[in-house]
Amino acid sequence: MGRLTLKWLGLFIAFSVVGVFSSGVVLYTYYYIHNAPPLCTLNGESTPFPGVTVNCIRVLSSPYAEVADVPLDVLAVFWFIINIVMAIAYDRSGEAVASRLFRVLMYWRFIGLAIIPYLLYVEFAILHALCLYCTIMHSMIIADFIVVTVYAYFNHRAKAKVAAVD
């Protein structure tokens, strides 16, 4: 066992695993076998948002779905995998390295969080279409950031209590 309890380690990793799966489904179905991902419609289903439909193909085939000819789903897979590796490294590292690594982990997760408003703007305002799998990935990034922030808060409080006792 490392510095994280099994519960915290599971939470640190679980959302990234779902993110890897979600982006992997898109990479395989859309980019490799050239089909619409499962549960995504070709003609779009309406959403609670006026004028916005669920239409993965519109989102994935748009020029906004790539950065320098690299699909965002490829970047997402790497982002989530790096997230998992850093969480495990943090769990297994010594105190000196763990402090710096946790800071990097927070910045890394903040970068993921910071990109979401732009992606949502593209989906809602420009394309008027939502991709189910993109939404899952956005949700996982947000949940992941919340978990790490809550952990940081409780970890800081626990360290403050120990310091007060000493």
Image (tube, grey):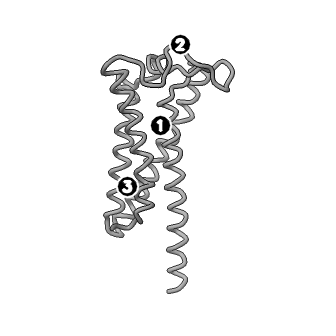
Above or below residue 146? Residue 29 is: above
Rendered residue at 66%/18% (across/down):
51
Badge 1 density bin: few <14, some 14–19, many ≥20, Cα 10 Å: many
Amino acid, disc 3: Ala
User: As shown in the figure, which amino acid type bears the numbered disc 2?
Assistant: Asn
Question: Which residue is farthest top?
Answer: 43
**Residue pointed to by mark 1:** 137
- Separation of marks 3 and 1 at Cα, in angstroms: 18 Å
What residue lies at 34% left-to-right and 67% top-to-bottom?
A: 2
Q: Is residue 16 left or right of residue 124?
A: left
- Residue 105: give x, y in percent of width and height: 42, 53
Residue at x 36%, y 37% (from the top left corner): 77
Q: For mark 3, what is the residue?
A: 87
Where residue 97 appears, as percent x and y from the top left, is: 34, 64
Of mark 2 and mark 3, the one earlier in the sequence is 2
Q: Position of residue 117 (x, y in %)?
A: 57, 34
Q: Quadrant of the N terminus?
A: bottom left
Q: Secondary structure at mark 1?
A: helix
Q: Is residue 55 above or below residue 138?
A: above
- Seen at 53% across and 30% down, the residue is 119
